[in-house]
Image: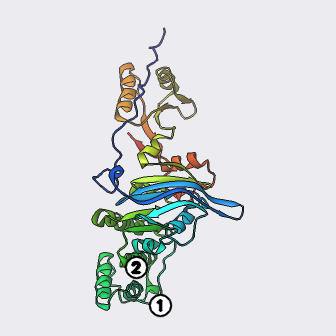
Amino acid sequence: MAGPPAASVPELPEEKGPPTMNTATQVSTTTRAAAISAIGLRKSYGDKVVLDGIDLRIPEGTIFALLGPNGAGKTTTVEILSTLITADGGEAQIAGHDVATDGDAVRHQIGVTGQFAAVDGLLTAEENLLLMSDLHHLSKREGRRRAADLLERFELTEAGRKNVATFSGGMRRKLDLAMTLVGSPRIIFLDEPTTGLDPRSRRVMWELIRDLVTDQGVTIFLTTQYLEEADQLADRIAVLDHGKLVAEGTADELKRKIPGGHVRLQFADEAHLATAAGLFGVATRDDESLTLQIPSDGSITNLRAILDVLDNTGVQAESLTVHTPDLDDVFLTLTGQQNAPAAATSATAQKESNR
């Protein structure tokens, strides 16, 4: 007897709704002035091309994340934009000031937190902040006021008079960021700010970074090898590979560019698997594991369509698992990498949920 006709899972149009802003910003970024912009930025060291003509536009009051494998040019980009080194070609502006010709004005607008905490372990936390106040030519009174305010904001008041050499890695990174804020910068470059931190300290840093944007309207330029960090924090993400920007968009927009989303059905026996395999036009069957993998965009409508097909034909699945591409998939696909960030391997490689 012939089985039921193959049922097709409906192809869904790509959603066109506005991207979710991780910083809960209400104003569209497209209407804001650019805090950071670059056109055709290039940099080489001898025969090695580090940046090969990258373009950037980062609106005020947003978090921008630059991802890329080791040696992709992330730190070089930060160094050029923060006037630490000069570009070989192209143009860049920070808050409307040209980085090549108006470096002093640029430096008045920015703060930089590097990959390693730039704190003096022989000084106390308060003394480190007061030192930064002197470097910014603040009065003694204003310097003390700002140091006390930052110690309180970063929950370091009790440790404020202890030598930094006794601090944990998380405390040192918090102090490093606090020192960056002494000059009240409107734009902050964070070059892998949570490298080496434990998960709890990393999440504390994330909250501090979010608060800078939501409470003070600061613009954050973030480089990171933690893909979850970019997913959690960034309004927009760019992927840099071999000196070129290979993709840019919101986290959701980048994930939608990557194929591979699917629903995985597992069955109790071969008979049910064979019946289910005949119901779906495009599916990958694995007789050994008794599973069927059906392409899916992970939407509720798509899942309901799959379940309706099973219900209408009386086929019982033992379990259903949904896989949607994550930033790990985006990174590996866009960079074609075997040299993915080490941290990516410790993050969740597949965002799957049992239903």
Q: Quadrant of the C terminus?
A: top left
Left or right of residue 285, residue 187 in this image: left
What colour scheme has been applied to the protein in the rendered image? rainbow
Tag shown at residue 122? 1
Q: Residue furthest front?
A: 101
Estimate the x, y position of residue 122 in percent, counting from the top left: 47, 90
Left or right of residue 28, residue 282 in this image: right
Residue under label 2: 179
Question: What residue appears at the point 43 percent right and 73 percent down from the top-left corner?
Answer: 105
User: For the residue carrying disc 2, how many other residues have a C-alpha within 10 Å: few (<14), some (14-19), or many (20+)?
Assistant: many
Q: Residue furthest right?
A: 47
Indicate which label's residue lies in the foreground, 1 or 2: 2
Estimate the x, y position of residue 293 in percent, counting from the top left: 50, 32
Estimate the x, y position of residue 161 in percent, counting from the top left: 36, 90
User: Does 353 sit above or below residue 294?
Assistant: below
Whether residue 229 can be seen here: no
Q: Could you say which is closer to the camera, residue 293 or residue 333?
A: 333
The amino acid type, in three-letter code, at marker 2 is: Met
Question: CB of mark 1 within 8 Å of CB of mark 2?
Answer: no
Closer to the chain start, of discs 1 and 2, is 1
Estimate the x, y position of residue 342 in percent, counting from the top left: 57, 60
Q: Circle 2 — which element?
A: helix
Q: Circle 1 — which element?
A: loop
Q: Could you say which is closer to the camera, residue 215 or residue 291?
A: 215
Question: What residue appears at the point 52 percent right and 68 percent down from the top-left corner?
Answer: 100
Give the image quarter of residue 296: top left
Whether residue 207 can be seen here: yes
Q: CA distance from mark 1 to mark 2?
A: 16 Å
Tag shown at residue 26? none
Q: Could you say which is closer to the camera, residue 309 or residue 239?
A: 239
The amino acid type, in three-letter code, at marker 1 is: Leu
User: Does 25 sit above or below residue 9?
Assistant: below
